[in-house]
Image (spheres, grey):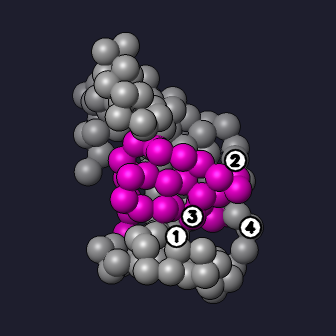
Amino acid sequence: MKDLDSITELLYGEGISMLGHNVSDEEAIALAQRRFGHASYCLVRQWIWIDLVMPPSLLEALERDARLPVMIYAHEVVMDSQGRLKPGDWVRTTPMVSFSDGFCFQTRNTAYFLLGPGTRKSAELATVVKVF
């Protein structure tokens, strides 16, 4: 029951309000196409910025791999450039490589455009990886 409670709190509990890029879906798609062309990108809404809580050894391994202890969970995919996800699907990213312009969350393989309001929370890595 503890795992279910932790996942429910992560996905639906309160957090710190954040604001992504405040543009229409059409404007966001046009911006992503100009900025990334044929590279992989995904536009999302109703997103959660997750600061990962993990043992020091895992944190060190992540940092050696040039990644940061942050992931995104989004309740709504607007558009995925590679067609891996459909509009309305949910997505959980891999750890962050970089963050720019207040809305562009970059992983090793994909740029995620965070659109509209979101929430920032902390969660154990063990909880986050159970959301799939």
- Residue 132 in view of the camera: yes
**Image vertical order of residue 66 relative to residue 34, above or below:** above
- Residue 10 in view of the camera: no
The image shows residue 8 at horizontal and vertical percentages of 40, 40
Q: Is residue 78 left or right of residue 116?
A: left
Which of the two labelled residues, at mark 2 and mark 1, occupies the earlier sequence position? 2
Q: Amino acid at mark 3?
A: Phe
Q: Indicate which label's residue lies in the foreground, 2 or 3.
A: 3
Q: Which mark is residue 22?
A: 4
Q: Which mark is residue 18?
A: 2
Q: Amino acid at mark 4?
A: Asn
Which residue is the site of mark 3? Answer: 113
Q: Amino acid at mark 2?
A: Met
Name the foreground residue: 104 vs 47. 104
Q: What's the CA distance linking mark 4 and mark 2?
A: 11 Å
For the record, the magenta segment spans 87-116
Q: Quadrant of the N terminus?
A: top left
Q: Amino acid at mark 1?
A: Leu
